[in-house]
Amino acid sequence: MVTRPPFAEKEFYHIFNRGTEKRLVFEDLYDYWRFLKLLFVCNNTKPFNLKYIDNPFVVDRQSPLVAIGAYCLMPNHFHILLTPLQEKGVARFMQKLITGYTMYFNTKNSRSGALFQGRYKVRHATDDRYLKYLFSYIHLNPVRSNIASQKNILSSLDAYPFSSHHEYCYPANERIQKAIVSKESFPYYFDSETAYVNELNDWIHYTEVEPQY
C-alpha cells in the first residue's frame, strides 16, 4: 500500500474525488446543499448532528481543522482547495465529510457501500503559479463540463450556486460561501473582483494541467 505523505500546515492541497464507477453523487438540489452544509460543520473538532441544527452556517466553530480556499461541486465529483490548520486536520476533516455525506446519500437512496471512488485524490500545490491557477481551474469546472454556458462565462458561473466563485466575484455579498471559505489563510492573489475575472478569462482556454473528472 502506498503511504500518503503527511499534510503540512501552511501548505496548500487540491483534493478531489468522483463517484464510484463515475456515478452521480449529487442527484438533486438537496444533495448539493447537504454537502455544502457538511463542508462547514465537518470543519470542526467538535461533534455535530445536522438533525438538530436549523442553520448550520451560524454554528460557532471554535477549532476548525482546515481552511478552505475554493471548492466546486459537480454532478459526479467535487474539488476542494484547502490548507491544514491542525495536525492531521485534513485527514480528520475529509473522513468526517466523506463518511457524513455517504451515510446521508445511502440512507436517502436505500443503498449501501462506498459512494466515492477509493481514497480521495491529492495534488500538493508546491509553487505560487500553480496555486493561483487552481482558483480558476476549480471555479471553471461547470464551464469546462458544459454545465454552464461558454458564451457568457461570468454570467454562467454567477448562476451556478455550488462553488465558491461568488465569494471572489462578489465578496461583499452575504452568502454561505463566506461562511465556508477562509480567504485570509491563502495568498492575496486578487485585489479586486476585476482581477479575479481577468484571471478566469486568462485560463478558460488554457491546456489542462489537472486531471479531468
Image (tube, grey):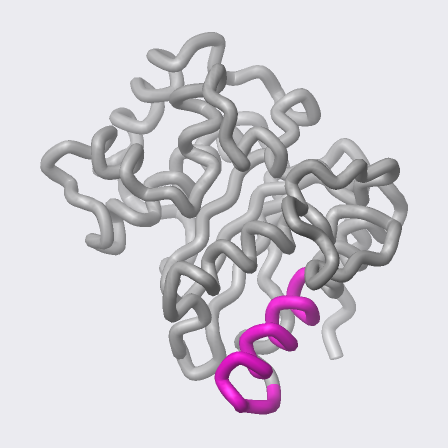
Q: How many marks?
A: 0
Q: Please say whether residue 164 is visible from this viewpoint.
A: yes
Q: Does the magenta stretch mainly form a helix, a strand or a loop?
A: helix
Residue range in magenta is 97-113
Relative to 153, 192 lies left or right: right
Task: Answer with the quarter of the image where residue 200 lies.
Answer: top left
Q: Looking at the rendering, in which quadrant would you find the N terminus? A: bottom right
The picture places residue 34, in percent across and down from the top left corner, at: 55, 59
Residue 90 part of the magenta-drawn span: no
Q: 135 or 169: nearer the eye?
A: 169
The picture places residue 182, in percent across and down from the top left corner, at: 65, 29
Q: Please say whether residue 12 is visible from this viewpoint.
A: no
The picture places residue 3, in percent across and down from the top left corner, at: 78, 68
Residue drawn 20% across the image and 53% down it = 146
Q: 72 or 38: nearer the eye?
A: 38
Residue 104 part of the magenta-drawn span: yes
Q: 201 or 4: nearer the eye?
A: 201
Rendered position, 74 above or below 23: above
Rendered position, 52 above or below 62: below
Residue drawn 34% across the image and 12% down it = 194
The picture places residue 153, in percent across and down from the top left corner, at: 21, 34
Rendered position, 32 above or below 1: above
The residue furthest left is 151
Residue drawn 61% across the image and 65% down it = 120
Q: Looking at the rendering, in which quadrant would you find the C terminus? A: bottom left
Residue drawn 47% across the image and 64% down it = 31
